[in-house]
Amino acid sequence: MLFVGATQINAGPWALPNLLKPKASSVGELVNYPNGTFTFATEQAVLDFVTNPDTRYTFQFAAGGGAAASKTASFNHMTDKGLYLRDQAAATQLRDSVFMAGQRNLPATFANVECNFYFQSAYMSGDQFAVGAALRSEASSRLILLHTAAEVNKAKDLVKFYATSCGLTGARLLPVQVSNSNLAFRECSGVVTARATGQTPAPTIPQLAFLAGLHSKARLYSVGGATSTVAAAVLSGSPDMVTQWSKVDPSKNSYWAYRVDKFLQGKVTANQPYVILWTRFSGKDGGAHPELDDSWTGLGQVIHRLLEDGRNIIVVGRPRSGKDIPTKLNAHLNELDRVKVAPRTNLKIWGEYWKKDPTHFNTKITGASRAAEYGIFLRMTTAPWNCKIVHLGMRSGAMDAAALLGMRTLFVEEHGNQQIDRTTKWTGIANSNRLYKRVEVSELPTATAKGSSVKGYSQPDVDLIANEVGSALA
């Protein structure tokens, strides 16, 4: 309901439907509150509110028969709030409906289609951005999602991103429950090898027997195949497949942009360069590749050096279970200060910025899909912030998202590592991809990677990382 003073407006020139016929779908968003009332002082105030949709005005609002309170908002802010909140709820509903629709697919029928098939295990969350980009760019492609009974929620979380932002439908999804998703992934890889060598695949895991009847002209790829597809597009300078991800950019919704701007206020200074430093401790908590984790010593060294260079640093990511990022980092930085003091003014620690607390997502800023967590940094690069940023972290599939969204990304990797083929897909043999670049150190900083009790980087490696950051922000 709309009021001018104490008089309810039901029709006439000041009624919202008459004023905004071209935006009729938006009118319903404004009055999306049950029994809500909007009270303006004058008819002109109503007119200003609806005809200048980006300008914020003050009015009285009461919901559900409660007491009216003063509110300041623009028309677009009010309409987009309804859209934004519904996007959040719709993403969860879409996740469940697509997953259930996929479960109803008959494996033999699903596999008898000429298309690209990708297979992924639910624990491979870091690869979801490359897989999502491939699914988005290839409308006929299909996904075989391997999971155990304990990994159903992990599988659904992947589907939430794929369905919400990448256009995946139930017809293109086949969830396959197995007793061991790691072994199942290797079994699928064996099918790829058999097909490539002209052999007839003979999967030993019963749930994967359908792969023996895969369409003769179909192609089966692991998550690495998705990486190849997407990285080739990035290297060619045509990452259009990912710029079309849905529900990721806050600038496309005024309410979301407003919430992100509110989060950034006091944390970020406009028109300044920032290093977004991602921590990685997933391996130490039971994830893949513990040798690629950070060490607190190495993080302290890099941060201290960047602070010496006057860089603005924002540390993000999840710490190792039971650890606290500020406590651990400050201990190492204090030790390094004994040699040379690096002022902490430019250091911000956001940690798990996407959460309100250890168990609840901060839905006011994170959006509807996993990639939307990067929306804060997209917002930083646009007006009114106009910050220049570079993402820095250990090699991880999670680093892919920043680069795929068009932000400069540096990942640290040791010289001569055995998985160089994966990274050269992104960087090129010459490491010449300006958007996604490898920082090749002599040794990784963890004791696990070194095979000794010594932790941290050598000084030349610290200097190399700092110099690459400087070049990226130049």
Image (cartoon, rainbow, N blue to C red):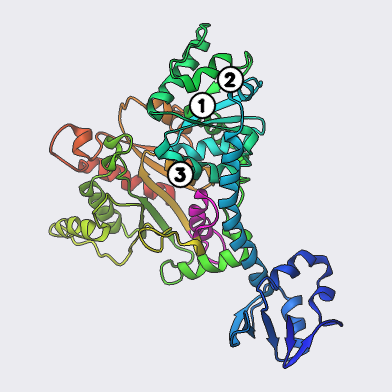
- Distance of label 3 from label 2 (alpha carbons): 28 Å
Q: Residue furthest right?
A: 12
Residue occupied by mark 2 = 219
**Is tag 1's residue or tag 3's residue first in the polypeptide sequence?**
3
Residue 32 in the image: state x and y as whole percent: 68, 70
Please tell me whether mark 3 or mark 2 is closer to you in this view.
Answer: 3
Q: Give me the residue at 49% from left, 21% from top.
A: 208
Residue occupied by mark 3 = 153
Amino acid, disc 2: Arg
- Which residue is more in the foreground, 249 or 436? 249
Which residues lie in the magenta part?
Answer: 366-387
Amino acid, disc 1: Gly
Q: Is residue 212 visible?
A: yes
Q: Tell me the tag on residue 225.
A: 1
Q: Is residue 242 visible?
A: no
Query: Mark 1 Cα within 10 Å, few/some/many (few <14, many 20+)?
Result: some
Is mark 2 in CB contact (under 8 Å) with mark 1? yes
Residue 175 in the image: state x and y as whole percent: 53, 33
As for residue 99 lying within the magenta part, the answer is no
